[in-house]
Image (spheres, rainbow, N blue to C red):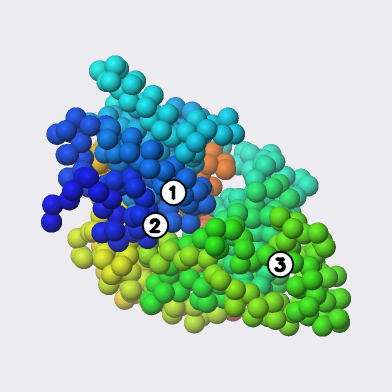
Amino acid sequence: MKTSLQRNNLDRSDSPYLRQHQDNPVWWQEWSADIVAAAAAQARPLFVSVGYSTCHWCHVMAAEAFSDPDTADFLNRHFICVKVDRETRPDIDQQLMRFMQDQSGSGGWPLNVFLAPDLRPIFALTYAPAVPGRGMLPLRVIAARVLEYFSSHAGELQPFSPAEEKPRPAPEDRLAAGLLAALDPLHGGFGQGQKFPPHSTLLYMLYRISAGSHPELEKACRFTLDAMRRGGLHDHLQGGIFRYCVDREWAIPHFEKMLYDQAMALWCYALAYRVLADEACKTMAMGILRCLEETFALGGLFATAWDADTGHREGATYVWRYDEIKAALGDLEFARFSASYRLPEKGNFSGFIHLARRDDLPLRDCEEKLLALRRNRPQPFRDEKALCAINALVACAYVQAARFLDRPELEARAARITRELLAVFWDGVGLGHSLAGGAVQRQGFLGDAGALLLALTLLRESDAGWNGSMNALAAYTASFRREGRWIESSLEDFHAVPASWFDHPVPSSVSLATLGLARAAALNGSRAEPLDYLQPHQSDFFNVAAMFSRGLFHQFHSRKALSWDRLPANSIQLRGEPEADCFGGECRPLRLTEARP
């Protein structure tokens, strides 16, 4: 069916985010080779707007500038307007974000970029209003100025081809100091502003502690893990975490919930329980599992995210009035609850209370009463597409939780998730990326390959039946390395994009691929080349892979499977003889009767 460029065509999209914009008067198109060809044939510049379904400011811009008839009319007359879901096209998002950061030093979503007909970038911005206000130019004025500039300077525009952004190597003995230098000594976490959960940083620190005592790292881990679970980042009633906190004190979150945060937090807290022997970490991990199964599970896979807004009010589902809490609980219950929770009568969020704890006293009876009331409220929008890479991270986290929490049934759950991923996305040649509206996006990205390979290597430790799938995915993952560098994708409708090395908010595609390939090599009886450590806070998950490549994970060779509760957290099990524990370049005979190291 031929697509008309003189209408908004997003009603035909499978993406939940794109469908959110189907009623805008802007003539939005979905990115495709046909749209790129049309722009070139008509010599018309493109206006490309990138976002995702649970992005608060994307909603604001959709309701303001993109719903304004005058703004829409100007864009429609002078540009081909394209909406991109960053979660289904990470390559386009990554390339345009790099351009914006190169142009202005910062970035964010919605990410709006004007492109020449041959895709050379002209100008990038984030949010812009429909009318002047707060010192901001309206989008229509910005678009007019861009059009004027393009008309007179088109021949001067340069292609944007960012080089691979591999961080610099870092000496191993300076990694801990580099991490600790950024620790917030008052509130935990890293940095002095908004607090994001530092998943990859915590994983590296915990594995480093497991490999050898480091009291300062241990103290920083405990401090940060406690701040995250007691503060406003944590949904204390149903488990799981919100996206980030807008303040240094971890008090008030941005209320969206992302699947990737739940997966990474589960891995962190399960690992912390094993390494730090802290029961509160186990309780937190079990709450994250509850959140995943009760709110994200969708058939055999998991939904992508929950919106921050309910009825156009951020956090409305989650916050409380003081009198509402008091009325819901009896006098004795309220006395206990108010002693353990911070409950300012005038609220801490626009007159409402967002729950945060003072201590760890058990209060499940009170929390369940409040949760029952909360379930009867209007709920946020859930993005029900399933992303291959993030579901694979969930499988990885379930395997780790099975081993570190002594819950073997969770590894069986991880196996079911992984089988579903293979059934839906793997065709024996390439890997799909997302499932939405019953349709699979048959475009492959390194992040999907690396994450699924990592999950397969974890399952392969327990069951040799995964060997064929693991080796097939290892070969597929390696195919994304071209002429000595990693690429995120190479699709017909966009140029090859260098893969990301930045390990936040999730491990980068390069780090996932690197650790997955190193583990697969070990399981196949070979050894990967030792990797350089890279800069702390940028490449912390990659540094876990570097630890593995340098022999700082125990390799337990045995005829039969060993009980995970007898092994250190930094371990991999390999079947074979002679039975041995190899660590730090040395192997010693395996003594099966010894206690867990």
Cβ atoms under marks 2 and 3 closer than 8 Å: no
Hey, which quadrant is residue 103 in on the image?
A: top left
Give the label on residue 20, or none.
2
Q: Is residue 386 visible?
A: yes
Label 2, label 1: how far apart the Cα atoms are: 8 Å
Query: Where residue 286 sits in the image (x, y, percent)?
Result: 61, 74
Label 3 CA crowd tier, 10 Å (few <14, some 14–19, many 20+): many
Cβ atoms under marks 1 and 3 closer than 8 Å: no
Q: Secondary structure at mark 2?
A: loop
Left or right, 249 with respect to 48, comes to right
Front-lying residue, 131 or 9: 131
Query: Where residue 98 sits in the image (x, y, percent)?
Result: 41, 35
Residue on which disc 1 sits: 62
- Reply above or below: 546 against 437: above
Query: Where residue 345 sits in the image (x, y, percent)?
Result: 82, 63
Front-lying residue, 345 or 216: 345
Residue on which disc 3 sits: 320
Left or right, 144 with respect to 231, comes to left
